[in-house]
Image (cartoon, grey):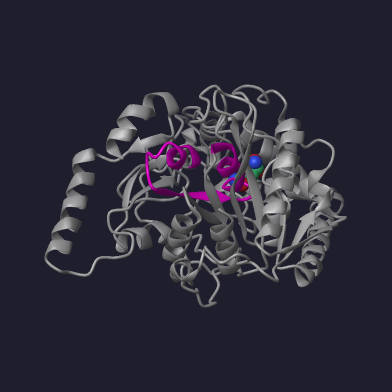
Amino acid sequence: HLSRLRLTEPQLKSFLHVSDSDAVLRQAALLDQRIANGEEVGPLAGVVVGVKDNICTADMPSTGGSRVLEGYRPAYDATAVRKIKELGGIVVGKTNLDEFGMGSTTEASAFQVTANPWDVSRVPGGSSGGSAAAVSARQCVVSLGSDTGGSVRQPASFCGVVGLKPTYGRVSRYGLMAYASSLDVIGCFGSSVADTGILLHAISGHDRLDATSSKREVPDFASQFASINLLESKPLKGLRVGVIRETLDEGVDTGVISAIHGAASHLEELGCSVTEISLPSFSLGLPAYYILASSESSSNLSRYDGVRYGNQAVADELNSLYGDSRAKGFGPEVKMRILMGTYGLSAGYYDAYYKRAQQVRTIIQKSFKTALDENDILISPAAPSAAYKIGEKIDDPLAMYAGDIMTVNVNLAGLPALVLPCGFVEGGTAGLPVGLQMIGAAFDEEKLLKVGHIFE
Ligand code: GLN
């Protein structure tokens, strides 16, 4: 993996920080030694992991892709990172992202743009584009991302890897830089469903450092893979699959639509009963998401004042120290979100925007509940198109936001979703991957992983 990194990183730019290779090799040698001595090692022993740079690591910089945190080294590891290390995983570096997770391409990173390994003139998706590209190019085995409105699932789709957004509360957010706290989750990337499930198992579970983390028991997602008989003719017999009609509508590329239809037929061959279902509130997700996410972010980002963390502007008076640190530290996308969010939360506008969006959120939650009472899983594309060109949407924020239509509803409802490759469209030199999204009931990651493993 270190040599893959050396070979591919100059073109891809997936990492903002790569660990010292001697230190990485020492860790690996130590694990080898422990194995040779017959000592127990964890299930991630020697597994090379990339970590999105908005997840705190004590021994490496953690910038969140922002100048405001340039040079910042947290005093602690995020719980997910701590667990990975305890189980023997080797963190090889910190991956690039849109500043604080706000974006869909990594072009909003303050430091660099990551390229899509399938076609380096295209975006890897975002905001966890670095983590997706790194797994796709085999710079690491698995990686961590974060998903507030699709930031694990859409880049997984663009880079042709597996991405999993867990149920809200399944994985501790301790040490994840807050974007929109009621939507944020840490998620996993892998090149297979099994790898992704093993990583999810490693990082899941209750954490007293995150009051929103769930006390639910964590099933051993990993053990089921060995017991599934892939040679059975109808291994998914009886499974009810609902295809969300509104996701195969206008505005979705025809190549994407036919890949999803192909995936639906494949699920039928595997024994599923596939029906088309309707989520009438689906299109309300996008406006509700952008109001809620911006509102929460405007509040969360108030902590970056030049005093507590990172870069501090030179100023002779406190208000200009705050103002200058923020003016210099934040990029344009983040500033736009803070402005929108502050507006949405203002007295006089609150009822029209924030409160209304919260009401829409409840409607969306209820419609998913009904659909998932009648179906085991729901399927849709992960994004309306395959990876597009770097620069193509940078001047049109609304077009960029519209690309999140497939994923934001799932965050508003707090549900788990798995994205995995299901086909290709024309483009690049070898075609471009298309991702299938499977949405499950809350805390039913086990079923998603099982179906995904059989599907792939
Ligand atoms: N693209 C979406 C946004 O900019 C989602 C980002 C995310 O999930 N972090 O808000």
Q: Is residue 346 visible?
A: no
Q: Is residue 340 above or below residue 114?
A: below
Q: Position of residue 36 (x, y in %)?
A: 13, 62
Q: Is residue 19 visible?
A: yes
The image quarter containing residue 400 is top right
Residue nearer the viewer, 115 or 245: 245
Q: Examine the structure image and report whether residue 248 is included in the region drawn in magenta.
A: no
Which residue sits at x=80%, y=44%? 248
Count of numbered tags: 0
Q: Position of residue 278 (x, y in %)?
A: 85, 57
Residue nearer the viewer, 314 or 147: 147
Image quarter of the N terminus? top left
Q: Is residue 27 above or below residue 11?
A: below
The image quarter containing residue 387 is top right
Residue nearer the viewer, 431 or 80: 431
Q: Please give left or right for residue 344 compared with residue 234 in the image.
A: right
Q: Examine the structure image and report whether residue 135 is included in the region drawn in magenta.
A: yes
Which residue sits at x=75%, y=32%? 398
Q: Position of residue 357 (x, y in %)?
A: 81, 54
Image quarter for ligand 1: top right
Which residue sits at x=57%, y=31%? 108
Q: Please give left or right for residue 352 compared with residue 149 in the image.
A: right
Q: Is residue 7 above or below residue 47?
A: above
Question: Which span of residues is magenta-colored?
Answer: 132-159
Q: Position of residue 377 (x, y in %)?
A: 70, 63
